[in-house]
Amino acid sequence: MGVRVHCHADLAVPQNLLRLTFADGQFDAVICECAFCTFPNKMAAAAEFARVLRPGGSMGLADLTRSGEVPPELQGLLAWIACIADALRIDEYAHYLSDADLTVDRIELHDDALTSLVHDIRTKLFAAELRVKLKHMNLPSLDFEQAKSLARAAAGAVKDGRFGHALITATKPG
């Protein structure tokens, strides 16, 4: 039995994550997908994941990673919505898991998945703009130039290696 935490692009991170309503050692596996970077208290979140894992249980954490600062054009509300504002370096994610007494077993880079995601977003943005111009869709309040500028900045940051995606697996000793 496992528990999965997922809150991609969700600004309302549940505060009850600081204390999950499950018994100690109840799960064989915990998966945290695109959510850890959004938690205000990452140490408490990692400790809760470890607490609900049984000895020998596995933890999988997949999240956006970054190296360096968020580029200025990607700061602000968009950075929080896109889960990049508080993304961490890979070693920082591993450090939180280790500090929660989990043994980090493997770190896999999946930056290509992020490259594909940014490409898909840019393609959908182009298609939406074309549909609006052809009068097949009405989006009166959308600033396509700003959206395209942000998408270009995101693509550049991914290409430059400032953002990536990683999967980290860990085990609870015992």
Image (cartoon, helix red, strand yellow):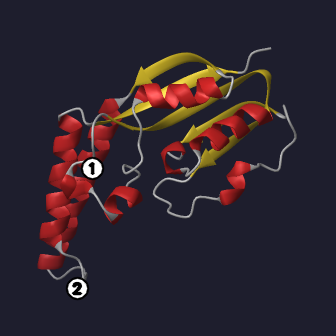
Q: Is residue 2 left or right of residue 140?
A: right
Numbered circle sitting on residue 21: none
Residue nearest the viewer, comparing 92 with 144: 92
Percent coordinates x, y for residue 12 in the rendering: 56, 64
Q: Looking at the rendering, which quadrant does residue 161 occupy? A: top left
Residue 126 in sight: no
Q: What residue is pinned by disc 1?
A: 120
Question: Element type at marker 1?
Answer: helix
Percent coordinates x, y for residue 63 in the rendering: 46, 38
Q: Is residue 61 left or right of residue 136?
A: right
- The relative height of residue 166 versus residue 79 in the rendered view (above or below) is above
- The relative height of residue 47 versus residue 99 in the rendered view (above or below) is below
Percent coordinates x, y for residue 87 in the rendering: 41, 43
Looking at the image, which residue is at 54% across and 43% down?
Answer: 36
Quadrant that contains the C terminus: top right
Looking at the image, which residue is at 23% across and 77% down?
Answer: 142
Q: What residue is pinned by disc 2?
A: 140
